Image (cartoon, grey):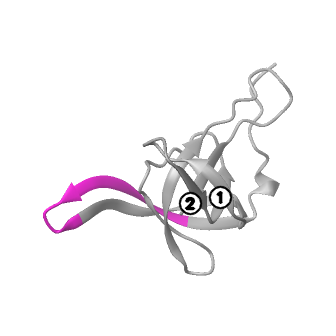
């Protein structure tokens, strides 16, 4: 059985993601904006950041498995609010009939 990916009809929202490139002498650098189809979930959750600290995520979204933003990437939500990526989870359904996806947790 082939991998199952998140069905397109579930991806009801669009966020704009600017990939984090790193710091510079003038501030953080970001890549060009890219629109990402997703399913947005705006609720508070506790997550662990890449540094191992438990922090509060204000929202998250799921997208296709190929989406993989770096921590600190800048995300503009549908309502215009700007936030940053805390961490990314990549559930893999493998041969099971459940969808593989990318789940992005936001500040």
Residue placed furthest toward the right: 97
Q: Of helix, strand and loop, which one carries label 2?
A: strand
Residue 15 falls in image quadrant = bottom right
Residue positioned 68% across, 51% down in the render: 62
SS under mark 1: strand
Q: Residues within 10 Å of mark 2 (few under 14, many from 20)?
A: many
Is there a contact, CB below 8 Å, between mark 1 and mark 2?
yes
Pick whichever, 49 or 62, lies toward us: 49
State the residue at coordinates (76%, 52%).
8
Quote the CA–CA distance across marks 1 and 2: 6 Å
Residue drawn at (49%, 47%) of the image = 53
Quarter that holds the N terminus: top right
Per the rendered image, the range of residues in magenta is 16-27
How many marks overall? 2
| Viewer-side residue, 15 vs 61 | 61
The residue that appears at 74% across and 38% down in the rendered structure is 5
Q: In the figure, residue 58 lies in which quadrant?
A: bottom right
Instruction: Give the residue at mark 1.
Output: 60
Does the magenta portion include 106?
A: no
Looking at the image, is 64 positioned above or below residue 46?
above
Q: Position of residue 4 (x, y in %)?
A: 77, 32
The image shows residue 52, relative to residue 36, as above or below, that is: above
Mark seen at residue 106? 2
Question: Would residue 17 be counted in the magenta stretch?
Answer: yes
**Secondary structure character of the magenta stretch overall:** strand
Q: Earlier in the sequence, mark 1 or mark 2?
A: 1
């Amino acid at each position: 059985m082939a991998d199952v990916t998140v069905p397109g009809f579930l991806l009801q929202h669009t966020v704009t993601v600017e990939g984090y490139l790193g710091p510079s002498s003038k501030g953080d650098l970001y890549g060009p904006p890219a629109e990402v189809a997703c399913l947005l979930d705006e609720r508070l959750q506790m997550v662990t950041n890449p540094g191992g600290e438990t922090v509060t995520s204000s929202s998250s979204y799921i997208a296709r498995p190929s989406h993989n933003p770096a921590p600190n990437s800048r995300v503009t939500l549908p309502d215009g609010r700007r936030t940053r990526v805390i961490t990314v989870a990549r559930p893999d359904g493998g041969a099971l009939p459940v969808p593989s996806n990318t789940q992005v947790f936001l500040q």
